[in-house]
Image (cartoon, rainbow, N blue to C red):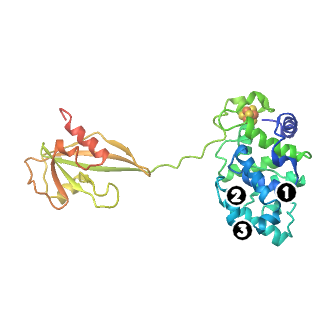
Amino acid sequence: MPKEQSFAQRLIAWQKTAGRHDLPWQQTRDPYRVWLSEIMLQQTQVATVIPYYQRFLASFPDVAALASAPIEQVIEHWAGLGYYARARNLHRCAQQIVAVHGGIFPKTAAELAELPGIGRSTAAAIAAFSFGQRAAILDGNVKRVLCRGFGIGGFPGSAPVDRKLWELAETLLPESAIEAYTQGLMDLGATLCTRGTPLCPACPFGEDCVARRDGRQKELPEARPRPKIPERTSTFVLITDGTHLLLERRPPSGLWGGLLVPPEGEVDQVLAARGLTVSERQNLPTLRHAFTHFRLTLQPVLCHLPSQPAMVGESGQVWIALDAAVNAGVPTPIRKLIQLLLRPGA
Ligand code: SF4
């Protein structure tokens, strides 16, 4: 783990020599420009943002100009950047700054975070870059750097890990040079400690980084845990006289709606409900099938009728020749079951 005091010092020193210094929004402390760039940079790459930022400023040079512009014109300038809620919030925020704050941006991260579209991390970035306020940022890039640097496990989007990261981010803040420190965190996440393969040999934390020391760069930060997919098991009764198979049409809606499937349910109940008596029954190997929302284990039970049944089934029932059943309108796992029956020796 990088020693907490030296973390900031090393980052600041690295930012000064190896960080980014020529981005269009770095040449100013104007909160309007800083705010605009921070909102545009959410979920969007620097190279994409630059021309949008410049066009936006040319049309709306200050917060008053933006506040008085029609929303349609703002959206037009945003077209192509995506996440359009950002543009609508930007416009609302500009109007609120004019109406409530007399056109002057509030100076603290806490007040900035009250405005539309400005979250805690963005508020801290604006306060640090515009007013030199000592406030912690924690966007996706910073979470990655901290999880790796300090070996923090768990999904960063979960409440306990998020809390831990905010606490750490606050602890790490330097006493001075907050702009270089904040920019350094952003630069490190964007240029060295990238999502794919981080460029560890060039990193100022070197072997003090937990992920690098333990070779866990690919594991950290941890991915969102996958929701557990429910499992279901169902018995399908394959009733046959040796040449034909009983299939039934499903109701039009629901699983396999309108398709032909063998009767489903507890074997004795299935047989009793259909007035059938079988001479032999045999459990066949189970088959697993994955649906989008659950996994189904099919337990097929083969039931032999002692004699050929009447070929006229009840409504919705079809006695179908085994070799024709494969090509009837049956769902994939049922087709696999029928193919098993057709195997020589089955
Ligand atoms: S050493 Fe590598 S993994 Fe660790 S913070 Fe630096 S770039 Fe990221």
Q: Nearer the viewer, residue 218 or 280?
A: 218
In the rendered view, tell whether residue 148 sits above or below residue 182.
Answer: above
In the rendered view, tell whether residue 334 sits above or below residue 77.
Answer: above
Q: Can residue 301 be seen in this view?
A: yes
Amino acid type, mark 3: Pro
**Which residue corresponds to mark 3?**
70
Image point (86%, 70%), residue name = 102
**Which residue corresponds to mark 1?**
31
Instruction: Mark 3 and mark 1 in contact? Answer it, CB < 8 Å.
Output: no
- Residue neighbourhood size for the residue with mark 2, other residues' Cα within 10 Å, grouped as few (<14), some (14–19), many (≥20): some
Q: Can residue 114 be seen in this view?
A: no
Instruction: Mark 1 and mark 2 in contact? Answer it, CB < 8 Å.
Output: no
Residue 182 in picture, x, y percent from top left: 83, 46
- Residue neighbourhood size for the residue with mark 1, other residues' Cα within 10 Å, grouped as few (<14), some (14–19), many (≥20): many
Hey, which quadrant is residue 130 in on the image?
bottom right
**Which residue corresponds to mark 2?**
77
Instruction: Mark 3 and mark 2 in contact? Answer it, CB < 8 Å.
Output: no
- Residue neighbourhood size for the residue with mark 3, other residues' Cα within 10 Å, grouped as few (<14), some (14–19), many (≥20): few
Hey, which quadrant is residue 152 in on the image?
top right
Hey, which quadrant is residue 190 in on the image?
top right
Amino acid type, mark 1: Pro
Q: Nearer the viewer, residue 227 or 48?
A: 48
**Sequence-earlier tag: 3 or 2:** 3
Image point (87%, 60%), residue name = 107
Nearer the camera: disc 3 or disc 1: 3
Image quarter (top left, top right, bottom left or bottom right) of the N terminus: top right
